[in-house]
Image: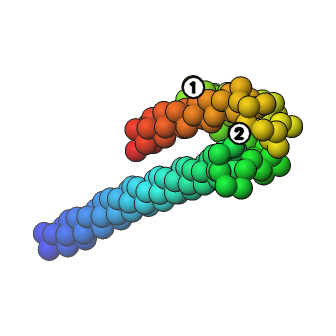
Amino acid sequence: MSEIIWAAVIGVGGSVTVAIVTVITQFFITKRVINSEKEKIVISEETHSREKRKERIIDALSELLITSDPQSSKGVDYGRTTNLIIIVQLLLDISNADELALNDSLNFLGMRLHDYYPLRLEHIDNKSSETKALLKAHDNVIQKARTFFKNYNHTNQ
């Protein structure tokens, strides 16, 4: 073969080689970008889900503390309070120590509420120990919720 044909074959071969390397490189770069975007979407969805769960727990706990307060103007709403205890407990992951502690404090609040509610219409002198126990359980829920949210914010960032 003549030198011109060899030069053409080498030129075409080089161009084909560059084209193949370019296609392979673009394939891997595109695949990496797609995977990176998928990871961002998954992280964003997980973050949104955690925040939504946190908001639901805050809302339910806030209402629970209002409906279980014997000193509130409306008094204790036994039915709504027990429903809210269950709602919060369903949202908790009891394999987490802070959430288990909050769950236990909710159980204790429910028991103190059970003791207080039949006496709710009695004179304060006849229900002072039950009222104090309910308020103590109320405070315990607040303290466990504070710990839960403090650690929730640190571990879920």
Residue 97: numbered disc: 1
Res. 7 image quadrant: bottom left
* Residue 17 pos. (x, y %): 28, 62
Quadrant location of the N terminus?
A: bottom left
| Residue 2 visible in image | no
Q: CA distance from mark 1 to mark 2?
A: 14 Å
Describe the element under mark 2 as helix, strand or loop.
helix
Residue visible at 57% across and 25% down in the picture: 97
Q: Give the answer, above or below, for where 69 lies relative to 25.
A: above
Mark 1 surroundings within 10 Å by alpha-carbon count, few (fewer than 14), some (14 through 19), many (20 or more): few
Residue visible at 14% across and 74% down in the picture: 4
* Residue 36 pos. (x, y %): 41, 55
9 vs 156, left or right, is: left
* Residue 111 pos. (x, y %): 78, 30
Residue visible at 71% across and 55% down in the picture: 74
Q: Residue 16 versus residue 106: which sits nearer the camera? A: 106
Res. 37 image quadrant: bottom left
| Residue 80 visible in image | yes
Q: Residue 21 versus residue 68: which sits nearer the camera? A: 68
Labels in figure, total: 2
Mark 2 surroundings within 10 Å by alpha-carbon count, few (fewer than 14), some (14 through 19), many (20 or more): some
Q: Type of residue at label 2?
A: Gln
Q: Type of residue at label 1?
A: Ala
Q: Which residue is mark 2?
A: 89
